[in-house]
Image (cartoon, rainbow, N blue to C red):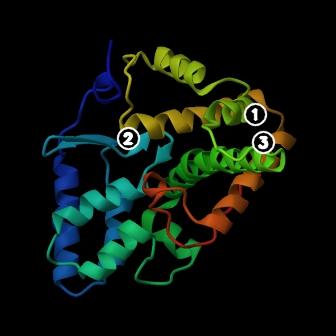
Amino acid sequence: MNSPESNNSSTQLTLGDAEVIRRFREAISTGKHWYISLLEAIGVWSSAEETYQGHHYRYLIAGEAFDWQLLAERLCETVDGLLPEDEKNALLLHNQPPLDITKEQFRDYIGHTRYRQYLNFYYGVTVERALVLAVKGEIRKERHVAGYIKDKDNTDEAFNRVYGEMESVLLEQFRKERRYRRLKSMSLSELKEFTYWLFKYRLKHNDKERVASDTRKALEWVQRHGLPNRLLNGQPTIIIEQPF
């Protein structure tokens, strides 16, 4: 059976993307702000995935969800030494862009198609993961109110509440559909893809009112706590349009 990294044929760096990197480097060298240059490079990047220096990168999940963070990291690596280290780290590690731009400007820089794919990733991966964490927090509070002092892993209960099935059952179904190998561990790439699959699963199996309510709950969690973890970083600090 195939693994997530080998299910689709790996693509090497295309001539088009090599030119994107060259122009990205040239723009910075001639004085253009590196963040604007980065966004414009992202807008014209063509590879959905690639193998680079022994690592496999999947930028587009299911042909729909664009992993902005991953490509930003990849492109910044190509101009290492040309970027202000503090600004680069603030963007890649803490979601703090060096420039304050509007969502319309961000969309124009990366392009409308890429922006829609970006929103798919934001709601389908970032917000979806936050939903599970929000429900896990609710369960912990319920247990404390009921007098349980010691916390225990409540992942399965959270998955049952959100998706109606345990995580292991859904993971097996996901891997069967994708024809991925059944492994004890999960790569970061597969985790993102699985999370997006869960998002689509929830849309399919819940009514619109429940979907909207759960999405609001997840967005409120992000507002209170910030992004769940580094897996879900990469969302620029702009106002995001809600799809409901």
Instruction: Name the amino acid, label 1.
Output: Arg
Residue that appears at 32% across and 73% down:
89
User: Cβ–Cβ below 8 Å for labels 1 and 2?
Assistant: no
Q: Is mark 3 on a helix, strand or loop?
A: helix
Q: In this view, does 111 lie to the left or right of 43?
A: right
User: Cβ–Cβ below 8 Å for labels 2 and 3?
Assistant: no
Residue holding disc 1? 161
Q: Distance between the residues labelled 1 and 2?
A: 24 Å
Q: How far apart are marks 3 and 1 (CA)?
A: 13 Å
Looking at this rendering, what residue extends furthest in the top direction? 1
Instruction: Name the amino acid, label 2.
Output: Leu
At label 3, counting other C-alpha atoms closer than 10 Å, the crowd grade (few under 14, some 14-19, many 20 or more) is some
Front: mark 2 or 3? 2
Q: Where is residue 87 in the image (x, y as percent from the top left)?
A: 33, 80
Residue holding disc 3? 211
Tell me the quarter of the picture where residue 135 sits. top right
Residue holding disc 2? 188
Judge whether 70 appears above or below 6 on screen: below
Q: What element carries label 2?
A: helix
Tell me the quarter of the picture where residue 223 sits. bottom right
**Residue 62 visible, this orientation:** no
Q: Is mark 1 on a helix, strand or loop?
A: helix
- Answer with mark 1 or mark 2, whichever residue precedes in sequence: 1
Instruction: Name the amino acid, label 3.
Output: Val
Tell me the quarter of the picture where residue 163 sits. top right
**Residue 180 visible, this orientation:** yes
Q: Position of residue 12 (x, y in %)?
A: 17, 40
User: Cβ–Cβ below 8 Å for labels 3 and 1?
Assistant: no
Q: Where is residue 28 in the image (x, y as percent from the top left)?
A: 22, 79
Q: Is residue 62 left or right of residue 225?
A: left
Q: In this view, does 80 lie to the left or right of 238?
A: left
- Answer with mark 3 or mark 1, whichever residue precedes in sequence: 1
